[in-house]
């Protein structure tokens, strides 16, 4: 039997010097295209980067926005020769370089601005990665609606009011700003349960499938494991994972039953990943220092 491939599971966590932050470009809303394949889900948007159209993965599990080196070199963008290390989803450490002040115009916006990126030398997808951190500023929030296939930026109080109008289950979510070692960027880790066991999970729209790590306290409940033939593609590598059917996941007081992956990896910050297979049932209000979620129990069907 041919092994399945779970689409990208990124966790781009920086462990080196910080990037400077250019003011975010004008941004109100843009369309998200959610790729669906073999139970995997990934949100992509389109932007013109340095005048060239580029698909970008909306990745809440990334501490920085990233451009592939092939794109940077082909379009002769200026990049800093000082290298820094990043850890991607498989735990592999990669050398990356800063690419600051890149012109970006999002689809649907009449004008553009500039964003700071890191450059990946080992990228396997050809996509850019857009981290929410690149768009946020105090008092504002991103509304991430995978089901409605839309990304919006609004004043935070206005965003909360608008989401409450259509979904009364909006709840404030406590999270930890997780860092590893000498970190310049942070990712958000939330509380959830898997098969009734409390777990710390990275909130990661850049992961197409929810995943538990080897140090997850729910691992003992995830039996039997299927053969470990599912290929998991990260930014720069492909690893193998086991698949477990009908796992009960609870997040934001909402219950999901999903087929999830088990990977032989460990992180000091989180014990698993809540990916887009779960988060597509939630509308997230991603503030500069706050987080809210309005989740819906899935109905039958894909």
Image (cartoon, rainbow, N blue to C red):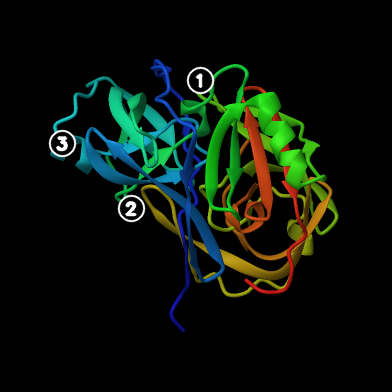
Is there any visible trace of residue 147 in the rendered image? yes
Question: Which residue occupies 32% across, 52% down?
Answer: 124
For this rendering, which residue is in front, 121 or 22? Answer: 22
Q: Earlier in the sequence, mark 3 or mark 1?
A: 3
> Which numbered disc, 3 or 1, marks the residue closer to the eye?
3
Question: Which residue occupies 70% across, 37% down?
Answer: 162
SS under mark 2: loop
- Tell me if mark 1 has few (under 14), some (14-19) or many (20+) residues whose alpha carbon lies within 10 angstroms of its own: few
For this rendering, which residue is in front, 63 or 266? Answer: 63
- Tell me if mark 2 has few (under 14), some (14-19) or many (20+) residues whose alpha carbon lies within 10 angstroms of its own: few
Work out how far the residue at label 3 is from the one at label 2, CA to CA, in angstroms: 17 Å
SS under mark 3: loop
Work out how far the residue at label 2 is from the one at label 1, CA to CA, in angstroms: 28 Å
State the residue position of label 3: 75
Work out how far the residue at label 3 is from the one at label 1, CA to CA, in angstroms: 32 Å
State the residue position of label 1: 182
- Horizontal placement of 69 versus 223: left or right? left
**Above or below, comparing residue 32 to residue 137 in the picture:** below
In percent of width and height, residue 132 lies at 52, 33
State the residue position of label 2: 125
């Amino acid at each position: 039997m041919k092994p399945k491939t779970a689409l990208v599971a990124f966790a781009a966590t920086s462990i080196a010097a910080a990037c400077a932050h250019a003011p975010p470009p004008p941004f109100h809303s843009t369309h998200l295209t959610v790729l669906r394949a073999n139970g995997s889900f990934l949100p992509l948007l389109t932007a013109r980067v340095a005048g060239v159209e580029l698909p970008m993965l909306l990745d809440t599990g990334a501490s920085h926005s990233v451009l592939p080196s092939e794109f940077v070199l082909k379009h002769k963008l200026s990049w800093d020769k000082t290298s820094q290390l990043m850890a991607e989803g498989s735990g592999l450490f990669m050398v990356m370089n800063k690419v600051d002040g890149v012109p970006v115009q999002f689809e649907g916006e009449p004008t553009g601005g500039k964003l700071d990126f890191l450059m990946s030398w080992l990228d396997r997808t050809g996509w850019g990665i857009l981290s929410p951190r690149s768009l946020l500023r105090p008092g504002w929030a991103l509304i991430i609606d995978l089901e409605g296939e839309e990304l919006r930026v609004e004043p935070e109080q206005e965003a909360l009011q608008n989401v409450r109008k259509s979904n009364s289950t909006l709840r404030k979510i406590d999270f930890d700003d997780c860092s590893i070692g000498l970190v310049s960027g942070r990712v958000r880790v939330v509380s959830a349960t898997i098969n009734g066991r409390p777990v710390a999970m990275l909130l990661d729209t850049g992961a197409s499938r929810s995943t538990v790590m080897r140090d997850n306290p729910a691992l003992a409940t995830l039996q039997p494991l299927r053969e470990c033939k599912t290929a998991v593609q990260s930014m720069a590598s492909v690893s193998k994972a086991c698949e477990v059917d009908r796992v009960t996941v609870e997040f934001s007081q909402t219950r999901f039953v999903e087929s999830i992956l088990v990977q032989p990896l460990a992180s000091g910050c989180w014990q698993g990943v809540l990916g887009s297979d779960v988060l597509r049932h939630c509308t997230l209000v991603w503030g500069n220092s706050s987080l809210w979620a309005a989740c819906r129990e899935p109905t039958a069907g894909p």
